[in-house]
Image: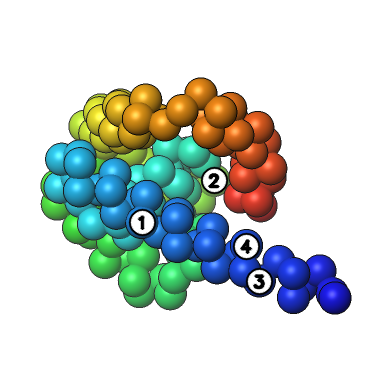
Amino acid sequence: MSPALTGAPTATRLRRVVTRLMKVMRRDTDAELSPSLLSALATLEDHGAQRISSLAAAESVDPSVATRVVSSLEERRYVERRDDPDDRRACVVALTAKGHRTLERLGTEQAATLAARLERLGARDVRAIEAALPALERLIED
């Protein structure tokens, strides 16, 4: 049997678990932002200030969608537009202090949600999850 066929059931289970886990974390935290807005904020935090076109590419969305996302975040004062130091005709989008604080707070709340759920598991299950983390981290590498 090919690896693609043997991996399909695992991929399906993993997708379901990750999707449901994200729903639990969103439900159990005060996430006043949609998943797409949170994702854009996280990208800006991880990769720094960038042009909207770069953000669109990183988020795998059309630049017009990224423009709307940035406008929504800007209205809420989570991001601000600044002159691009490499090209004064362009601008970059950067997190504001409020954006940083919000991501930090949500991260803390989500970690607490996960910690509470991990505490309900047995030590063997927790060790299995810990052992799987390096492989899961490799899955999300670019």
Among the two numbered marks 4 and 2 on one chain, the one whose residue lies closer to the N terminus: 4
**Marks 4 and 1, how far apart in space?**
15 Å
Along the viewing direction, whichever of 121 and 44 lies nearer the viewer: 121
Q: How is the image coloured?
A: rainbow
Residue in view at x 74 percent, y 69 percent:
6
Of discs 3 and 2, which sits in the foreground? 3
Tell me which amino acid carries mark 4: Thr
Q: According to the image, label 1 marks what residue?
A: 20
- Judging by the rendered image, the residue that carries numbered circle 4 is 10
Q: Residue 67: horizontal and vertical position, in percent?
A: 32, 65
From the viewer's side, name the closer residue of 127 and 88: 127
Determine the CA span between mark 3 and mark 2.
45 Å
Q: Amino acid at mark 1?
A: Arg
How dense is the environment of label 2, judged by Cα within 10 Å: few (below 14), some, or many (20 and up)?
A: few
Q: CA distance from mark 3 to mark 1?
A: 18 Å
Q: Mark 1 or mark 2, which has the lower sequence index?
A: 1
Q: Nearer the viewer, mark 1 or mark 2?
A: 1
Q: Which mark is residue 86?
A: 2
Q: With respect to residue 21, does 108 lie above or below? A: above
Mark identifier at residue 8? 3
Mark 4: few/some/many CA within 10 Å (<14, 14-19, 20+): few
Q: Position of residue 25 (x, y in %)?
A: 29, 44
